[in-house]
């Protein structure tokens, strides 16, 4: 793999690390099967693209994209909490609705950003010679800030109440904690991170597209599982670190698979990205069982 391809895989992995941190909140902390991610990821990108093309500062546009993602998470939570719609169905309804909303925001299935300012612009040379390593570095900064914020937030009283809600909502409610508020806040934070990831993604791709959200939740969940399997831990700061590493490794595996001469020889190519992704997700889901099998074998 060339250095440019390596940095490209790292860049993509770091963007999806933000997605994985969001999925960690919904699936692991809240125990909420939230599929809103497939809609909030392109929503963040769409909001960013429209804002930048209308002259808004890219840093503010990123914040607005993240805010849009948070609102989509709140909507999912509201459907479940207030209208008593089951968790999975509520997230599917929002995800489906966001497809049309994203089309209305962009005005077309795609919106190019060529020539527009981005959060990377102040750090990239005029000849773009350093772009391949500057972009991953800037995104890494976003990921570190997100990780440190989550480590701090989920050690606060509000954060602990969200964690308690996911463990046992009835017991938490009996202790006087407003579990509905905790759920809404957790889903908002989850999709805010995913919306931010979408805003960063469209900047690296040079445009927003309606289809960029397909499979987002699958990638995020796979990254969480890979991270938890490779770096098991109970401390929250270890868990968030594991998820980030899991996302980077997952995208690296994808890049290696697509660039493998062996796979190319038997007919695999870029058009098989979703197939390779599905296979890697299946392997990721089986990792815990494989790991425990080898542990028992070595003990015997």
Image: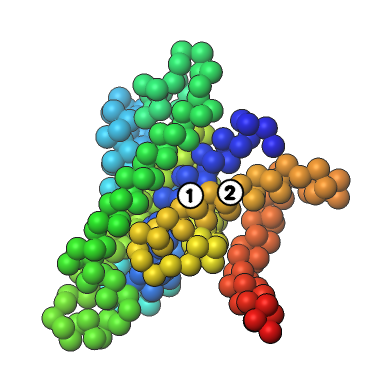
The residue wearing badge 1 is: 16
Q: Which image quadrant for residue 124?
A: top left
Q: Name the element at disc 2.
A: helix
Residue 106's place in the image compared with 85, above or below, is above
Q: Outermost residue toward the left? A: 176
Q: Residue at x 39, y 45 (%)?
A: 143
Distance from the alpha carbon under mark 1 to that under mark 2 = 8 Å
Q: Residue at x 63, y 35 (%)?
A: 5
Looking at the image, residue 290 sits to the left or right of residue 72; the answer is right
Nearer to me, 219 or 229: 229
Counting residues from the start of the chain, the first of labels 1 and 2 encountered is 1
Q: Is residue 48 visible?
A: yes
Residue 93 at x, y = what percent? 41, 65
Q: Which mark is residue 78?
A: none
Residue 74 at x, y = what percent? 28, 61
Q: Which image quadrant for residue 32?
A: bottom left
Q: Name the element at disc 1.
A: helix
Q: Are marks 1 and 2 in contact (CB under 8 Å)?
A: yes
Q: Residues within 10 Å of mark 1 (few under 14, many from 20)?
A: many
The residue wearing badge 2 is: 251
Q: Residues within 10 Å of mark 2 (few under 14, many from 20)?
A: many
Q: How many marks?
A: 2
Nearer to me, 118 or 20: 20
Q: Residue at x 16, y 83 (%)?
A: 175
Q: Is residue 210 visible?
A: no
Q: Outermost residue toward the right? A: 265
Q: Outermost residue toward the front? A: 299
Looking at the image, residue 28 sits to the left or right of residue 213; the answer is left
């Amino acid at each position: 793999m060339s250095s440019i391809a390596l940095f490209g895989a790292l860049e993509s992995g770091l963007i999806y690390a933000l997605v994985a941190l969001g999925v960690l909140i919904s699936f692991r902390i809240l125990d909420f099967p939230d599929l809103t991610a497939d809609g909030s990821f392109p929503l963040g990108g769409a909001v960013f693209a429209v804002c930048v093309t209308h002259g808004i500062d890219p840093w503010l546009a990123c914040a607005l994209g993240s805010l849009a993602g948070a609102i989509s998470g709140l909507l999912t939570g509201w459907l479940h909490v207030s209208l008593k719609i089951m968790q999975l169905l509520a997230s599917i309804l929002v995800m489906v609705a966001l497809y049309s909303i994203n089309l209305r925001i962009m005005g077309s299935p795609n919106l190019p950003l060529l020539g527009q300012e981005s959060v990377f612009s102040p750090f990239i040379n005029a000849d773009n010679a350093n772009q391949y390593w500057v972009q991953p570095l800037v995104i890494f900064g976003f990921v570190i800030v997100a990780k440190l914020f989550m480590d701090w937030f989920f050690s606060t009283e509000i954060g602990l109440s969200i964690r308690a809600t996911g463990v046992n909502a009835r017991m938490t409610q009996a202790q006087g904690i407003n579990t509905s508020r905790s759920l809404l806040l957790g889903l908002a934070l989850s999709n805010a991170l995913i919306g931010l990831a979408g805003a960063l993604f469209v900047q690296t791709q040079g445009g927003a597209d309606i289809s960029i959200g397909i499979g987002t939740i699958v990638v995020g969940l796979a990254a969480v599982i890979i991270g938890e399997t490779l770096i098991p831990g109970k401390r929250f700061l270890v868990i968030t670190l594991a998820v980030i590493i899991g996302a980077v490794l997952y995208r690296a595996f994808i890049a290696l698979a697509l660039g493998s001469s062996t796979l190319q020889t038997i007919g695999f190519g870029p058009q098989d990205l979703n197939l390779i992704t599905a296979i890697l997700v299946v392997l990721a889901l089986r990792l815990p069982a494989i790991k425990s099998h080898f542990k028992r074998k070595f003990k015997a």
